[in-house]
Structures are given as structure tokens and as C-alpha cells.
Amino acid sequence: MAKKTIMLVCSAGMSTSLLVTKMQKAADEQGIEADIFAVSASDADANLEKKDVNVLLLGPQVRFMKSQFEQKLAPKGIPLEVINMSDYGMMNGTNVLAQALKLIGE
Amino acid sequence: MPNRKQQILDLLRDHPEGMNATDIADTLVLDRTNVSRYLNELAKELAVEKVEGRPVIFKANTDQVKEHEKETVSFENLVGHNESLKVSIQQAKAAILYPPHGLHTIIFGETGTGKSLFAECMYNFAVQAEMLAADAPFISFNCADYAQNPQLLFSQIFGVKKGAYTGATEDREGLISKADKGILFLDEIHRLPPEGQEMLFTFIDKGIYRPLGESSVTYEATVQIIGATTESSTLFLSTFNRRIPMTINLPSLKERSIDERYEVVMLFIKQEASRLNQRIIVERDAILAFMLYDAEGNIGQVKRDLKLVCAKAFLHYRTHDEPYLTVIQKDLPLQVQKGLLRIKEAPERIDRFVDKHSQYLTFDAGADEVVWSQDPTQSMEVYNTIEEKVSTLTSRELEKIDLEALIEADVDQYFQEYVKELASNDLHREIIGTEIWDLTEKLYDIAEEKLGRTYNVKSRFTFALHLQSSLERIKDHKSIIHPNLNNIRKNYSKEFQVAIELSGLIEEQFEIEIPFDEIGFITMFLSMDMTEKKAAMENKVAVVLLMHGKSTASSMLEAVQELLNTETGTALNMPLTMEVRQAYNQLKEYVETNKEQLSSGLLLLTDMGSLNTFGNMIYEETGIRTKAISMVTTMCVLEAVRMAGMGRSLEDIYQNVQMSFQSMVRNQFKSQKDLRKAIVVTCFTGEGVAAKIYDRILPVVDTERIEIITMQYFEKEAFKKHIDDLMEVYEIKAIVGTVNIEYQNIPFFSAFDIFNNDKLNIFKRIAADDVPLEQMVTSLEGTIKSVDSVQKLLTLLQKLIHQVQSDLHLIVEPGVDAGIIIHLAFLVDTILQKKENREFKNLEQFKKLYRIEMDAVRTNLMNVEKQYRIKIPEAEIAFITQMFIENRINQNFVENQS
């Protein structure tokens, strides 16, 4: 199974970084090889250039950027979604990881 | 007529045990309704007594069998007899006293100035002064009555000889002969045809006349002629002035002083109170309006308008069993209400009459009223009609509120509103039972065939909805009243026939009895034209600011337009020197000039509540739907202009702007309570449609945490009241129903929405509960370490984001609440750890666009800044503001900010 690159985007990249930690932990536990990182909305574009992102997840507070990202990601075929709000609220790394993997199609 | 009354009274005296109206009618061979009318009059005069029960028994009142004594009217009774009428009265007295038989007189005056009354006063004065015998005749005749038939008119006045024309089978005495040794009053004398004029002048000059068809003999009579006319053309004057020596002018209402107008109003209300033998309480503003309004029909019109208002009050009094009649400004005819616009012209003078501090004036039934026999408005007919209606309708145990609406409202108007309401409900067919739908189709197919016309789906659908609610009413034994059944039957006889036939089918299928009144409604549905109105050009709602001060309105609007970078909105300034009426005209002119652009309505924003009356008047006068909001702030104007720019509807904007104002006030008092959550489901019955909606939403609602409350929608205001009550106990997440309710910013879903999966999904997300705060606290504890209590921080932040939404008057998408809370928690943490700041792209532009919103966010964050001794940078405030604005519900996601 190839390594997964999961990018989380929120306003400042602060809140999602906690989620990243928890997702990473969940991935390790499940033996999944994943590169999970969080960026602020303004840094998202640069990171998309730099890295080969498999899936993008948005913090609920920047839900409004979804269409914007959809336009950018569609040509590259990168799926994206807003993080399930209750998982986000509870910082449930396991569930969010599952959401990301499901989007990639695994 | 009075002798009929006497007849009835005599009959009752012969039957001391009493009789009911039907028996009296049968005995005297009179029409029953007329008999009850006379009986009611007699009862008012206390000549007969009503014995309650059904049927009502009437008894002659033996104790006080006194003829109602009426004083005759004299000059001293006239308002202004010492002022505006002083000269006229002196002239009139001189004309009467002039030897030997007085002077022929002509009275000039506009319509309604009281010419007939004045003539009657002259007669009474003549009797008093013993110029005429006590039994001298006073004959009154209106020349306009026979103006189309000069021959008949002539013969009325001068009499006719047998054989003068076909149909003149016998000699008939003319009025002039009947008035011998008395006074003949000829109203609208200018309508007299030339032949008549000539004969009249002959009579005036020589005292002789000749009846129609009389060729040889002349007749003599001693009659003082008093003519009255509104005509003041020189041609008329020259003809009459030469022959009639005395000319008296009566002043128009405009020429009378405010003191006199006050007296007129007081006198008339007292008269009504006496007539009804009932106390009347009148609102101060209503009195003022009556004193000030522009009554083109002069005193006569004031009297009619007052009568109308009293009749309205009487209706209310009878239907609501109130202890007295109440007249309030709101009930006045529009034209009268407009009198209040002139209040500024004479403020200090007005207070003299009506004490500033008393809100109401009381009028009690007083002494025997002075009666003027010619007064048509004196009749009790209006009150009797109301009385009759009320008594027949209450016997059907109709709910009071319906009753009044039905009697008062114009039926066609009422029906149109009803149909509009039904049709506007974009209901899915699912919510109409198959049985009713199939029947409707069947009925309409029959109707199409019989009436040779077609009905579209919308018509059928509307009828189905109506049928559904009618059936429910009939099954619940609630009455259905069609106030104008006879007219419907007459005017739409074909449709009525078909309606009867259709009713038979409905009766058969549902095994109920369809009342005639319901058939009337069905008839109306069949005769209704529901062709799709072609979509009107979509105009946006116009926003007009009207404020006191040289440039208050324009500078406020300018600020808002600059902030929003728009040109929407119109400012009307009202310098303090400007009269209210002028300001109104200015507004009206604006509306009339721009009528075509105003089809979506007009929102009027004012700085004082008194200007809100304009809204109603503009609507009545121009037909442009107008809503007014007073005491607006820049925030309100901003909101209104922005929403108007987005093409939102008038009602929508109105509700929202009002809401933002209300919530500002309310939130200062409301304590933060833990409220249970609920969804309100509503329809007209609270059973039919609501039950279907309930079934549909049940699966998507977590009923353990959110209650679904079913409620009947009866009337808008009552419904809102219910919602208010519920909000004490519940946090209402959404309202779902058949009637669109925009209230308290509670998201509304129509029944149609709910049957659409995408919309149901949105509903689900909104209705779904927020992430519980406790769980968020648990997840963040241990990560956010710079504050002593995460719980405390999050609680504070949660309150804050609710407050911001309320202040900005928006709702963010579900889940965003939690997102923003977490974001803020980390932000506080970051600042406390003094990490570096970040930039907000195009901050200046954003600030300009959303200054108000940023202010609201900043103000709310001040509490956090204080608590944690931090300073939140402007860029962060912009980010937060953006989260609120961009994530609000109804926002079109396609809109791209980058």
C-alpha cells in the first residue's frame, strides 16, 4: 500500500494541527503509512505545488472555501471534503483518518 | 314610517303579555325584517322592552310610555352661531321678520355646509317669532330628484290639472299650494328647468301661479320661498339675484375656525352616544384627525365619516361584548387619518382642546338630542343592520374573530386573499390525500365539461387544499359562513348550479352534508380565473430613508452606500421647517414617479414612529406595498440596503431588519439558559399536513435530543405569540409548515422543501444538534495549556459566537459553530504563547466592505481580550469575521472571493 499524503486546511493551520497529531497516531496504530500535515488557507496553494497530495480535508470553519478548492483540485483529480463536524469537534483522529481514506477510495 | 311604529306600539299595548316579531308582522301584515327594525328602534327609545330568549318577546313598556320628545332645532344649536355663522343668522332673521310675509331667500353654500338644516332653523325661528302659525307648513323638496323630467318636476311644485298629460288622471295639488302660509324649501334650485324658473319668478313677483295644464285660472298662495344651491356661476346668479332679494352664504368647513371644528366633532359623537344610549370612548388622535382632516364634503362629510367609524365601533362592541364603544385612530378612514399630518401646523392650538396627557375621551349618552328632521345620517339603520347580522350569526355559534372579519371585509377581497394564500403554498401533492385529489380531478373534469372552460393544475390544486380544510371544518361541526351568498347565486348562477351538483358528489363520497355557504365558496372557485400571471419584471425592493433634519437621511444613506459600494436606496430629507404633509407629498411624489420600479414594494426607514403612518397611507393611495420601520440605526439601514441589493423580498427584509433591532434589545436582558431543543411543525389544522411533515422528518431528527412540536397555525400574530412562549423553554431549531413564517431568525422550511431530498438534507444539518461542548473540552484539554481552564474558555467562546450571529443577524452552517470555537481557542492559545502574526490579504478592502461586521466581532471579542489580557490583531478579526460571513446559510457557495 502506497504512502498516503493527507492535507488538512483550516484558517490558520492551528486547530487542525492537533487533529494531525491524533490522525497520525491512529495511522501508526493501524499500520498505515501516511504523511498527514496541516496548513493555513493561505499556504495551501504552495503546498499543493510542492507535494503530491492525495486528499484534502477542510476545517468546518473554512467550509466556504470548498468550491474554491474544488475548482483547483478537480483537474488533478484530488478529492476533498469538509471534516465531519462532530469528529472535528471531538478531535477524533481515527474517524477523520477513516474519512480521508474513504475519499481516496480505500 | 313613524305611524307604523305607532301601530306596532299600539298592538303591543293591547297585548300586555308581549309578542314576538313574526306574530306582529303577521298581525299587521308587514315585512318581518321591517318589524324587527321598528322594534329595535322602539326598544332604544325605551318604548318597548325586550324579553330575552328565542324568539325574543317584545312588551310595551308601561312605566315609561312617553313619546320620545325631541327638541326642534334652532339657530342657537348651530355650531358657530356666534362666530362664522353670525352674519348669516342675522340675515336669515331679517329675512323672516321682514314685513309682511318675509323675504324670499337663497342660501349659497358648498355641499355639506348645512343648507337644509339652516332652512329648517329659519322656519322654526319664524314660528317662534310668530311670523308663522305653529302649524304652518314647512315643505322641503329637492329639485334634483326630478331633474330628468322637467314636466314632472313642474307638476310636483305647481300641481297638475286632470288631462294635462297622459297619466294625469286627476287634479293634483302642488307643493306650493301645500306650503301655503308657510315655507317652501327648494334644495338644488339650480336644477329647476327654465319653464319652472319662469313660473317661480312669476309667483315671486305676483304671488300667483298656474298648475300644469291649467290655461285660464291662476291660483294664489302666500309662501316664503327658500332656495338652496351650490351653484355660484354668474349666469345663475344674475337670473336669481334679480328676483330673490336675500342671499345668504354659508361658510365651508375651511372657513370655520378650529374651535368650531372641535365643537362639530364633539357634538356629533355625543349625538351618536345618545342615539345608541351607550358610552363611546374615543382615542385622542382620532379626535385630532377628525378636527384636522380635509373634508371636501364639509360638515356633512364629517358627520358621515363619524357615523361610519361609530358603526365600526358598534360592530366591535357587539361582537366582543364590550361595555362600551371604542373609536381608535387606526379604524378611521384613510382620508381622516391624514388629518394627523397637519398636526404640526397648529400644535399649540390643538393642545388647548384635547389634553396632551389624556389618551382617550369619554362621551356618555346625554339629554334628548336635538333632531333635525332632514338629517339622513340620523337613521339607526346601520346599527340595526349590524344588530341583525350579529344576532343571526351568533346563533350559529361562530367563532367571534371570524365573524367580525367576515361582516366587515369585502368578500371578494377576502376570497382573493384566501386563494392567494392557498396558491402560494407550494405544497407537494403528497400532502393532499389521494382521495381528495382524485375527487378534485373528477369534480373539475365535470365542471370543465358543464361550463365549457378549462382549469389548470394550479386551480385544481388550490381547490383541493380548500376542500381538505373545509371537510375538516364540517366534520368538526365548525360553521362555514359565506357572507354574500345571494349575490354569488345571482351573479354566477351557472357556476352555482354546477357547484350544487359537485357538492352532491362530495357529500356522497364523504357522507357529510355540505352547507349552502360552502357551495357559495365552491362557486367562487369555479368562477375564478387562475391563469398563471406572467412573471413580472423582477424589481428589487426600494429602500427609502425619511428623516428629520436638513441632511440626516442623505448622509446616513451616503455612508451606507459607500460601505457597500452600491447606489441602492433613496434619501428624503425633512428639514425641521418642513410640514409633515409636505414630507408626505414628497414621498408620494417619489412613489408615483417611480411606480414602475416599485412593483416589489418599498421599505420606508424613518427616525420617528410617527412617520410610520406614511407606510399605510402610501399603500392605500398608490397600491405600492410599503412597510415602515422607525428609529433606525445605521446598522438597520445597512442591512436593509444590502438585502434589497440581493433581491430579497420586502417581507423578508422587513422581518430581518426588525429582528436585528429586536435581538439587540432582547439580548441585553435575556439570561443564558440551557434550553431544550425543538422543531416546530405547523399547518392550518395542526393535524393534516403537519402529521405528514412529522412522518417525513422523524427519521432525520434525533428525538432524544430534539423534540418535534406540532402546532396549529391559525393566525400569524397568534402563531408568533406561541413561538415566543415556546422560546422561553426551547431553543427552536427550525419551523416546518404550510405557511411561510419568517420569525426570530428561525430557519423556515416549507412542506414542499421537506419532500425534496436535497432540502431535507439541509434541514437535517440545521436541525441536528451542535457538538456538545463537553466533548470539545475533553478533546482540547492537554493541548491548550496556556489557559487555566479550557472549559471556561470554551463556554465563553460559545456564548460569543451565538452573540455574534445574533448581532450580525445570520446563521452559520451547522458544524461551523464548533469549528469557529476551536479556531478561537487555538487563537487565544497562540497569542498567549506570543507566536508570530499572520497577514490577511486585502485587509483594507475587506475592512471597508465589512466594517460593521468587524466592529461587531471585535466588540464581542473584547471580553475575551480582557479575560486573558491579550490583544487580538486586526488581521485575525478579519479572518473570524470572514468565517461568519462566508459560512452563513443561504449564502451562494459559487460566489468566489479570491
Image (cartoon, coloured by chain):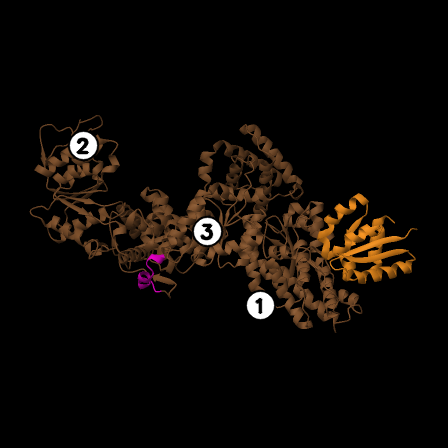
Task: Decide: is B115 above or below B526.
Answer: below
Q: Earlier in the sequence, mark 2 or mark 3?
A: 2
Q: Position of residue B807 (x, y in %)?
A: 60, 61
In terms of depth relative to the viewer, which is nearer, B640 or B661? B640
In terms of depth relative to the viewer, which is nearer, B628 or B324? B628
Question: Within 10 angstroms of label 2, few (less than 14), some, or many (20 or more) residues?
Answer: few
Q: State the mark number for residue B615.
A: 3
Task: Decide: is B534 above or below B409.
Answer: above
Residue farthest along the bottom direction in this orientation: B788
Mark 1–mark 2 Cα distance, whole angstroms, equals 80 Å
Q: State the mark number for residue B669.
A: 1
Q: Which chain is orange?
A: A
User: The N terminus of chain B appears in which quarter of the rendering?
Assistant: top left
Mark 1 touching mark 3, by CB under 8 A?
no
In terms of depth relative to the viewer, which is nearer, A68 or B291? A68
Numbered disc in front, either 1 or 2? 1
Q: Classify mark 1: helix, strand or loop.
A: loop
Q: State the mark number for residue B194.
A: 2
Q: Chain of mark 2?
A: B
Mark 1 touching mark 2, by CB under 8 A?
no
Q: Earlier in the sequence, mark 1 or mark 3?
A: 3
Q: Amino acid at mark 2?
A: Pro
State which region is magenta: B343-355
Identity of the residue drawn at 23% across and 42% down: B230
Q: Position of residue B73 (x, y in %)?
A: 21, 53
Q: Which chain is brown?
A: B
Q: Chain of mark 3?
A: B
Q: Classify mark 3: helix, strand or loop.
A: helix
Mark 2 touching mark 3, by CB under 8 A?
no
Q: What secondary structure predominates along the stretch shown in magenta?
A: helix
Q: Classify mark 2: helix, strand or loop.
A: helix
